[in-house]
C-alpha cells in the first residue's frame, strides 16, 4: 500500500479488473520526477501479476532515444513466441523491424498493427498488462507504434500503462486518458517525513521541508541523505545546495560522485548499454579492469540492486550516472562497450558505441554509421536512420561526404515526419559541396516539406523548378516531380504560381523532346492534355488518358502512385463508371502497399462516388476510415468526405462545425481546392434544404475557384445555377449554366450531360424547359448516380406542380422522395416531402415513411455496421482488422454483438440481415 495514493490505486485497480474481464484500457500517468509514478507502476504490475495477468515492462532511457524500436523490441520480446499467430504481413513487418529477418522497409502503421495483434494474441491466453515507465524517453519508432496501439485497443484484454514526467508531452500520447499525480497531501507528506527522519525534527525545519518538497515522495525520502542530523534537529544550519523536489536527479548525481572510482565506472557501463544486456556489460567491465564486486558500494547507498545485471533503483539514478560522467569517461566506456559488442552479429549497436567513443572525425566509423542507417531504413525506421546519419555527419572527414550524409538524413527525417529537423539538415547539406543531381534532390525535398506542412501554394514553384533541373539527370525523377507539382498546384487552386496548365506545358516541353520521344503513359497524357489550350485538343487527350488508365489496368501493369490522376480525371470528365473502377483499384493498391499516408486521398475518390450514387452508408464508412487515418497519421487534410456527407444528409450543425474548424485554415494556407470544396458543401446543404439565398454566395465563391481537374468547383456551377435561378439572379444563372454546358460537352458522358440538362431547365421556359427536364432524367437514368437522378426528378416535379400538372408532379416528386429517403439524404428528402404535401400527396409520404421504418431494422453503431459489411463481403476477421486498424479480438467482439442484434448465426446470413442504412 502506498501512502496517500488510495484514489490512484483504486483507479488503477479498476483498470486491471476491466482488463481481466476482457476489455482493454489505456492510461497515461503524468507527474513531476519523484512524485511516485514508478511506484504506482510497480504496484499495479505486482497486483496485476497476483490476479493472473501477464505483465511485460519497459523503461525509456534517454541515451537510447536514437535506437529505433529499442523499447518496442524489449517490450515485445517475452511475447515473440506468438509471432507466428499473426497475419503474414504483420508478422513479417515485426520480424523485419526487430531484425529477425531481412526484408524491405515495413510500413510503420503495419508495424503498429502487428504490435496490436501480438498483444491481443498474448492476451487470448492471459490478460496482459504492459507497463511503460519514463515513456517520454522512448525512441520515436517505439512511441509511434505504442501510441497507435493505445488508440486502437478495445476488447482484447490488454492494459497499457504509461508514465510520463512533466513537463514532457510526447505527441504520440496526446489525447489518451491520463492520471495527473500531484504531491502528497500535507498529512501524508508529514507522515512520510516522520518515518524517514531518524532524529527529532526542529518544528521550523519540518514546516520548511514540507513546504519546499511540495509533497514529492522521492524528495522527502532523500532528506536524511542530504541533511545532517544537527541540521534536522537544530534548524540553524541549512546547506545552500540541498536538493528538493525540483532537483532530485542532482541529489543522485552528488551521491554517485561520492562512490569509489570503480563503482562509478561500472555504473556508467550499465547506464551506457542501451538494452541492459548483461553480456556486453560484463565484457566491457572486464575490459576496463573493473570487477563485479564494485557494484556492492552502489547497492549499499541504495542506488542500485545486486543481481545478474545492474538494476538501478530509479530511472533518475541511471540518468544521473550518465549525466555526471566526464566526456573522457563516456568515450572510454563506449569504447569498451564497442569492443564488447560483436560487429558481425550486432553491427548497429557496435557502430553506435564506436561513434560515441570517437574523440574526433573518423571516416571508418562514419561509414559504419552509414551502413547502420541503411539497415534502419530497410527495417522501416527512418528516425533511427536519421540519428545514425547525424552521428556520421559529426564524424565526417570529407566535406562532400558530410553534405551527402546531411541530405540523406533530411530524406530520412521527411520519411519519419519530422519536417523541422529535415529543414535544418537540408541547410547543413546545402552548406557543403553537392553535385548537381543532389542539389536538385535537395530542392525537391525542400518543396515537399513546404507542401506537407502547409499544403498551400508555396511548394508549387520550387517543385517545378526542381523538376526542370532534374530532366538532364533523371527523367523518371523529373516526371514524378512534375506530377507532384501538378498535384500541389491543383490543391493550391487558381492562385497557384505557376498554375496547372503552365506546369503541364513545361513538363511536356521537357519530357517529350527529340526526334523519338517515348510513348506517353496515361498520367503523361493528362500532362499533355493540360498543356493544350482549352478546346477539342485538350478534351481528346484527357479522354485518351482514361483509355490509357483502362489499358494499364487491363494489362496488369504496375499502378503507380501518380495514377491517382485516373480518378481525378474521371471525376472531371463526369465518367461515373470509370470513377467507380479507378477509385476502387487505386485504394486497393495503396492499401496493399502499406502507404497509409496516401490512403486518405485514395479513399476519398471512392467516397464521392458513393455519395452521388446514393450509397451514403458506404460513403460514411469511407469517411470514418479517412478520419481514423488522419488521426493516426497526423495528416493535415480537411475531412472532405465527412463534410460532403453531412451536407447531403442535411445536417446543418455538423456542416457548420466542420466549416468553422477548417475553412479559415485552408484559406490561410492557400488551399484553393479545399476552399472550393468546403464552399460547395455549404451550397449543396442550402439547396437541399430549399434555402436558395443561403446557397448563392458559397456557390459563387466555389465556382469562382474553377480550374482544370477541380471537380468541386465544377459541381458548384450546378449549385450556382439552381441557387441563382431560384433567387431571381437569372444573369448569374445563365452564365454558370453556359460554363457548365461547355464542360459537360467536353466530357460527353450521360452523367455530365444529364446534370447540364437539369441546370439548363432552370434558365429556359415552356417546352424547352420540359425537354431539358426529360433529357436530364433520361441521361441520368443510364448512370450509377442515383442522387443526381433523384434531384432531376425533384426539380421536374417542382416545375410540373407550378405548371399545375399535379398528377404528373406527384409521380416525379414521389420517386425523388423515395430515393432520397432510402439513401438517407434527409435534407433533399424534406424538400421533396414539402413539395409532395403541397401537391396533395400526404398519404404517400406517410406510407413511404412507414416502409422506411420497417426497413430500418435493429440499430447498429457505425463501427458495428462497418465490420458487419466487410464480413458479409467475405473478409476474414484478420483482414477486417487490417483494413480498419483494429485487433482481431476487437473485430470478434463487435461481430458477436452484431450477430446478437441481427439474430443471425453465421457470416453468410449477414448480407440479408443488414439494414440499407443505419442512423444512430
Image (spheres, rainbow, N blue to C red):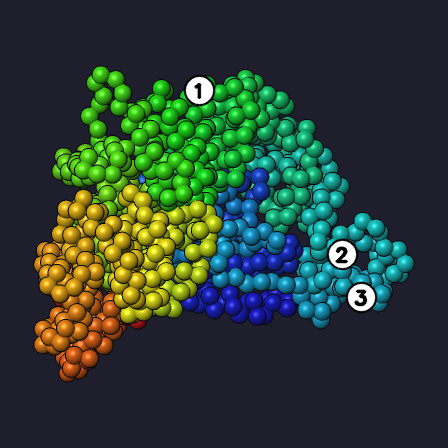
Whether residue 372 is visible, yes or no, is no
Q: Earlier in the sequence, mark 3 or mark 1?
A: 3
Residue appearing at x 23%, y 51% in the figure: 738
Residue that label 2 marks: 223
Q: Residues within 10 Å of mark 2 (few under 14, many from 20)?
A: many
- Residue 153 image point, x, y percent: 39, 58
Residue that label 3 marks: 207
- Disc 1, SS: helix
Residue appearing at x 32%, y 69% in the figure: 691
Please determine whether, in this image, residue 69 is positioned above or below residue 829.
above
- Disc 3, SS: helix
Residue that label 1 marks: 436
Measure the alpha-carbon separation of dots 3 and 2: 13 Å
- Residue 602 image point, x, y percent: 29, 47
Q: Residues within 10 Å of mark 3 (few under 14, many from 20)?
A: few
Q: Quadrant of the N terminus?
A: bottom right
Q: Earlier in the sequence, mark 3 or mark 2?
A: 3
Amino acid at each position: 500500500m502506498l501512502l496517500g495514493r488510495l484514489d490512484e490505486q483504486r483507479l488503477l485497480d479498476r483498470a486491471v479488473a476491466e482488463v481481466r474481464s476482457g476489455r482493454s484500457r489505456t492510461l497515461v500517468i503524468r507527474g513531476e520526477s519523484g512524485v511516485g509514478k514508478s511506484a504506482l507502476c510497480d504496484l499495479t504490475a505486482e497486483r496485476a501479476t497476483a490476479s493472473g495477468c501477464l505483465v511485460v515492462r519497459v523503461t525509456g532511457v534517454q541515451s537510447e532515444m536514437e535506437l529505433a524500436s529499442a523499447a518496442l523490441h524489449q517490450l515485445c520480446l517475452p511475447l515473440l513466441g506468438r509471432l507466428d499467430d499473426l497475419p503474414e504481413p504483420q508478422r513479417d513487418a515485426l520480424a523485419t523491424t526487430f531484425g529477425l529477418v531481412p526484408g524491405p522497409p515495413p510500413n510503420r502503421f503495419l508495424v503498429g498493427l502487428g504490435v496490436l495483434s501480438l498483444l491481443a494474441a498474448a492476451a487470448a491466453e492471459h490478460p496482459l498488462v504492459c507497463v511503460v515507465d519514463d515513456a517520454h524517453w522512448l525512441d520515436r519508432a517505439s512511441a509511434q507504434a505504442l501510441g497507435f496501439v493505445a488508440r486502437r485497443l478495445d476488447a482484447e484484454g490488454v492494459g497499457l500503462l504509461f508514465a510520463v514526467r512533466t513537463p514532457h508531452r510526447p505527441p504520440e500520447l496526446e489525447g489518451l486518458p491520463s492520471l495527473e499525480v500531484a504531491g502528497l497531501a500535507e498529512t501524508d507528506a508529514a507522515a512520510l517525513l516522520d518515518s524517514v527522519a531518524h532524529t527529532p525534527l526542529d518544528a521550523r525545519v519540518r514546516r520548511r521541508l514540507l513546504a519546499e518538497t511540495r509533497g514529492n515522495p522521492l524528495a522527502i525520502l532523500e532528506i536524511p541523505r542530504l541533511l545532517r542530523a544537527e541540521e534536522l534537529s537544530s534548524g540553524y544550519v541549512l546547506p545552500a545546495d540541498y536538493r528538493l523536489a525540483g532537483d532530485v536527479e542532482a541529489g543522485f548525481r552528488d551521491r554517485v560522485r561520492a562512490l569509489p572510482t570503480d563503482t562509478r565506472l561500472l555504473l556508467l557501463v550499465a547506464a551506457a548499454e542501451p538494452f541492459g544486456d548483461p553480456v556486453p556489460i560484463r565484457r566491457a567491465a572486464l575490459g576496463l579492469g573493473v570487477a563485479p564486486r564494485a557494484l556492492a558500494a552502489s547497492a549499499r547507498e541504495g542506488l542500485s540492486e545486486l543481481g545478474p545485471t545492474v538494476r538501478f533503483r530509479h530511472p533518475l539514478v541511471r540518468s544521473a550516472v550518465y549525466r555526471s560522467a566526464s566526456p573522457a569517461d563516456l568515450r572510454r566506456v563506449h569504447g569498451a562497450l564497442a569492443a564488447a559488442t560483436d560487429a558481425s552479429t550486432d553491427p548497429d549497436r557496435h557502430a553506435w558505441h564506436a561513434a560515441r567513443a570517437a574523440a574526433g572525425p573518423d571516416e571508418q566509423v562514419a561509414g559504419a554509421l552509414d551502413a547502420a542507417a541503411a539497415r534502419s531504413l530497410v527495417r522501416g525506421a527512418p528516425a533511427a536512420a536519421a540519428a545514425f546519419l547525424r552521428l556520421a555527419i559529426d564524424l565526417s572527414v570529407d566535406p562532400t561526404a558530410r553534405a551527402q550524409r546531411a541530405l540523406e538524413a533530411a530524406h530520412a527525417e521527411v520519411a519519419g515526419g519530422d519536417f523541422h529537423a529535415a529543414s535544418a539538415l537540408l541547410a547543413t547539406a546545402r552548406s557543403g559541396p553537392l553535385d548537381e543531381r543532389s542539389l536538385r534532390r535537395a530542392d525537391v525535398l525542400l518543396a515537399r516539406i513546404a507542401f506537407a506542412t502547409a499544403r498551400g501554394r508555396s511548394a508549387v514553384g520550387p517543385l517545378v523548378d526542381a523538376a526542370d533541373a532534374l530532366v538532364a539527370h533523371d527523367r523518371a525523377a523529373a516526371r514524378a516531380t512534375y506530377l507532384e507539382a501538378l498535384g500541389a498546384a491543383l490543391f493550391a487552386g487558381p492562385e497557384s504560381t505557376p498554375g496547372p496548365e503552365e506546369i503541364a506545358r513545361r513538363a511536356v516541353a521537357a519530357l517529350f523532346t527529340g526526334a523519338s520521344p517515348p510513348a506517353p503513359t496515361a498520367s503523361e497524357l493528362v500532362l499533355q492534355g493540360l498543356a493544350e489550350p482549352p478546346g477539342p485538343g485538350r478534351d481528346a487527350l484527357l479522354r485518351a488518358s482514361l483509355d490509357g488508365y483502362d489499358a494499364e489496368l487491363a494489362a496488369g501493369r504496375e499502378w503507380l502512385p501518380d495514377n491517382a490522376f485516373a480518378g481525378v480525371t474521371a471525376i472531371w470528365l463526369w465518367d461515373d463508371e470509370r470513377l467507380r473502377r479507378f477509385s476502387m483499384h487505386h485504394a486497393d493498391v495503396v492499401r496493399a502497399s502499406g502507404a497509409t499516408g496516401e490512403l486518405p486521398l485514395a479513399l476519398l475518390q471512392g467516397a464521392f462516388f458513393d455519395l452521388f450514387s446514393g450509397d451514403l452508408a458506404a460513403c460514411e464508412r469511407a469517411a470514418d476510415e479517412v478520419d481514423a487515418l488522419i488521426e493516426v497519421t497526423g495528416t493535415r487534410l480537411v475531412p472532405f468526405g465527412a463534410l460532403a456527407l453531412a451536407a447531403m444528409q442535411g445536417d446543418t450543425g455538423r456542416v457548420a462545425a466542420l466549416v468553422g474548424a477548417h475553412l479559415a485554415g485552408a484559406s490561410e494556407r492557400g488551399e484553393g481546392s479545399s476552399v472550393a470544396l468546403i464552399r460547395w458543401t455549404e451550397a449543396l446543404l442550402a439547396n437541399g434544404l430549399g434555402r436558395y439565398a443561403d446557397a448563392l454566395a458559397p456557390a459563387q465563391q466555389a465556382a469562382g475557384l474553377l480550374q482544370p481537374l477541380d471537380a468541386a468547383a465544377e459541381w458548384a456551377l450546378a449549385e450556382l445555377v439552381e441557387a441563382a435561378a431560384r433567387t431571381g439572379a437569372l444573369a448569374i444563372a445563365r452564365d454558370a449554366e453556359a460554363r457548365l454546358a461547355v464542360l459537360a460537352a467536353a466530357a460527353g458522358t450521360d452523367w455530365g450531360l444529364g446534370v447540364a440538362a437539369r441546370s439548363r431547365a432552370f434558365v429556359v421556359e415552356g417546352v424547352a424547359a420540359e425537354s431539358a427536364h426529360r433529357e436530364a432524367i433520361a441521361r441520368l437514368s443510364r448512370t450509377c448516380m442515383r442522387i443526381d437522378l433523384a434531384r432531376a426528378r425533384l426539380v421536374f416535379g417542382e416545375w410540373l406542380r407550378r405548371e399545375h400538372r399535379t398528377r404528373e408532379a406527384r409521380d416525379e416528386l414521389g420517386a425523388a422522395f423515395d430515393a432520397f429517403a432510402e439513401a438517407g439524404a434527409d435534407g433533399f428528402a424534406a424538400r421533396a416531402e414539402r413539395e409532395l404535401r403541397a401537391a396533395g400527396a400526404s398519404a404517400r409520404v406517410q406510407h413511404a415513411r412507414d416502409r422506411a421504418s420497417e426497413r430500418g431494422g435493429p440499430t447498429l453503431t457505425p463501427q458495428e455496421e462497418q465490420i458487419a459489411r466487410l464480413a458479409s463481403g467475405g473478409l476474414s476477421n484478420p483482414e477486417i482488422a487490417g483494413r480498419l486498424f483494429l485487433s482481431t479480438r476487437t473485430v470478434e467482439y463487435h461481430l458477436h454483438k452484431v450477430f446478437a442484434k441481427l439474430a443471425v448465426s453465421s457470416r453468410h446470413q449477414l448480407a440479408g440481415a443488414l439494414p440499407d442504412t443505419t442512423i444512430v
